[in-house]
Amino acid sequence: SMWLDCALPIIMVRYEDLNAYGEGVLHRVLDEMGVRYRNERVDRAVQQQAFDVKRKQVELDGAGRPYGKTIQLKHLRKGKVGDWKSHFNGEQRLRAKSYFGEVAERLGYEL
């Protein structure tokens, strides 16, 4: 958790926020970094990276991608917010909480 308290500027980006309002998150990050951009280009870039759009792209042209279509689709996983919780059993949840509980809580996650 020490990195959260460092003097360096940190731009916090959470997957949940990207999923809910990606364009707004990217605009905020670029603004905080002092990057000049055109709103429509940022909005289009976020829309093109949406999970369902990427999955459709891989389904269409996956055979021509590195490692092939099957591996690319497996790499995409589900893309659902909070799905990581379904992969923890009780012991793993307790272990994660003991190692990462404080940081997770500060970042708005409940283990």
Image (tube, helix red, strand yellow):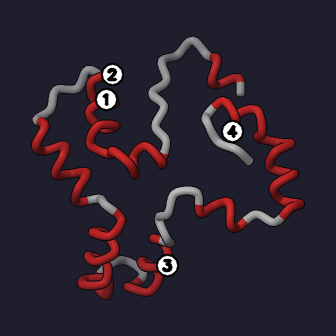
Residue at 29% x, 59% y is: 49
Report whether 1 appears left or right of 4.
Answer: right
Cβ atoms under marks 1 and 2 closer than 8 Å: yes
Q: Secondary structure at mark 2?
A: helix
Indicate the quadrant where residue 61 lies.
Answer: bottom left
Cβ atoms under marks 4 and 3 closer than 8 Å: no
Which residue type carries mark 3? Lys
Q: Which residue is mark 3?
A: 74
Residue at 42% x, 81% y is: 67
Indicate the quadrant where residue 2 lies.
Answer: top right
Q: CA distance from mark 4 to mark 3?
A: 27 Å
Q: Which residue is mark 1?
A: 28
Which residue type carries mark 4? Ala
Q: CA distance from mark 2 to mark 4?
A: 24 Å
Q: Which residue is mark 4?
A: 104
In percent of width and height, residue 19 lies at 40, 52
Q: Secondary structure at mark 1?
A: helix
Q: Secondary structure at mark 4?
A: helix
Which residue type carries mark 2? Glu
Report whether 26 appears left or right of 16.
Answer: left
Q: Is residue 89 above or below residue 1?
A: below
Nearer the camera: disc 1 or disc 2: 1
Cβ atoms under marks 2 and 4 closer than 8 Å: no
Mark linked to residue 32: 2
Q: Is residue 16 above or below residue 84?
A: above
* Residue density around tag 1, few if under 14, some if 14–19, many if 20 or more, within 10 Å: some
Q: CA distance from mark 3 to mark 1?
A: 31 Å
